[in-house]
Amino acid sequence: MSPKSRLYTLVKAWKNKPFQEVRDACGEQWLGLSRQALEEHQSWSQRQAISHEPIFNLEGTKLTGSLFRPLLTATDTQLLRLFMEGLDATAYWYRSGRFIAGILPIPAHALASSAYVDAMSDLILNSRLPVGLVSLGLQCLPDKDVLPACKEGLLRMRRLGVLLHLMNFKGSSTELLFLQEMQLDGIHLEMELLRSAVLPTQIIAAAKKLQTQVYAGNISLVKDLENAKTLGVDHCYGGLMMPAVSRHQTLHLNDSRIAKAIFSLHPHQHLNQNGDKK
């Protein structure tokens, strides 16, 4: 065997090792961790998929996180493979010197399943990511019959240092009670749904009193951005800010395209050597 082929074998074995350990820990094939799925996960083309939606501060001048969109439509058999892929992207940014928080949306029934929670816990521990870089986005409030189990699953995630978000927040009294009880770290508003309905600013004020970060998603119109500013949200994402990109492209982002357009009109602004505004 030539030195080059031996090096290839060693690198391939090293790259596969963490995922093999997770598969052994999680066990059951119905959770989506078959050998075929693992090999698919490792493919280069999949790692370059346009899957990561950048999240910026309200002004669009700072990248604050990334939403891993494939998990929003994942089936039960795809869930853990995609969860692994989302963690791997966050670890890739972290190893490259960027502290980009990854938000991984998870359905309520998965967080109510001890098997899924056990598997996700192993994946998070294997990633060795620092506290604050991994967030779980609960896609909707759980049904009453699985509510206790879902709360337990969320608490187990929190004990690992994972931040907890609630997606599709509409400001209902049930959501506010859940927000207060679970002390969630973030809520996500769908601006598309708010075009025909007004969300009272006191709802946002109540969330901020609980030290919850407010995210505005699906911002595709200038009016959406104006409404987000009126509501006083903390973070924005959507096509107007920047469409989804690959994980490698995410690594090189700093500003939204809205901020880039504004800066292009003000060339007198000076930047320091790190590319930050003085």
Image: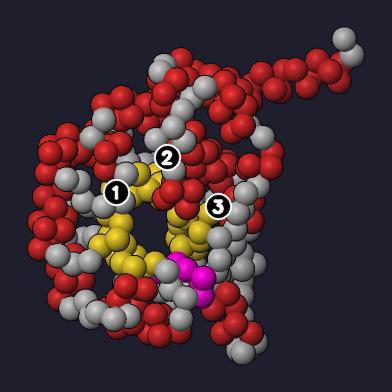
Q: Main secondary structure of the magenta part?
A: loop
Can you tell which quarter of the image residue 124 is in?
A: top left
The percent coordinates of residue 116 (x first, y second) are 33, 29
Alpha-carbon span between mark 1 and mark 2? 15 Å
Please tell me which residue is depicted at 31% across the width and 67% down the height of the picture.
189
Magenta residues, as a range?
235-241
Alpha-carbon span between mark 1 and mark 3? 18 Å
- Is residue 183 highlighted in magenta? no
Please tell me which residue is depicted at 14% across the width and 53% down the height of the picture.
178
Where 261 falls versus 145 (above or below)? below
Point out which mark residue 151 bears: none
Q: Is residue 192 left or right of residue 17?
A: left
- Quarter the C terminus occupies: bottom right
Residue on which disc 3 sits: 51
Alpha-carbon span between mark 2 and mark 3? 16 Å
Mark 1 vs mark 3: which is more N-terminal? 3
Where 149 falls versus 52 (above or below)? above
CB under 8 Å between discs 1 and 3: no
Amino acid at dot 2: Thr
Q: Is residue 164 left or right of residue 70?
A: left
Residue on which disc 1 sits: 138
The percent coordinates of residue 118 (x first, y second) are 32, 25
